Image (cartoon, rainbow, N blue to C red):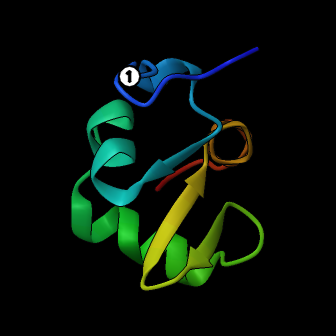
Amino acid sequence: MKAESNEMLPVSEKYMLTIKEAAAYFNIGIKKMRRIAEDNLGIVAVYSGNRFLIIRPEFEEYILNSSEI
């Protein structure tokens, strides 16, 4: 499978999302999403360079198992 640089992958098919993408996708504020990423580093998020990346399948599981965000 060859991925071209000018071809954008839909957010729903990405494995990892930036804070802004995740906030828009899950309808959660950016500040709250960043706080969740900081508190659950290694579980639902990883730190790559100077940014957090949300692991979408893990975050979906986290949301399903929590009673409040």
Nearest the eye: 14 or 41: 14
Tell me which residue sits at (46%, 21%) in the image: 9
Name the side, left or right, on which 40 lies relative to 17. right
Work out whether residue 19 or residue 14 is closer to the camera in this orientation and state it. Answer: 14
Height in image: 42 above or below 44? below
Tell me where residue 22 appears, x and y as whole percent: 39, 45
In this figure, what is the number of numbered marks? 1
Quadrant location of residue 2? top right
Q: Position of residue 3 (x, y in %)?
A: 59, 22
Say left or right for 37 vs 58.
Answer: left
Residue at the (57%, 76%) spot, across then down: 48
Q: Nearer the viewer, residue 46 or 7?
A: 7
Q: Which residue is mark 1?
A: 8
Return the x and y of residue 58 as percentages of the image width and height: 74, 46
Name which residue lies at 24% across and 61% down. 30
What's the residue type where badge 1 is placed?
A: Met
Residue plotted at (43% across, 31% down): 5
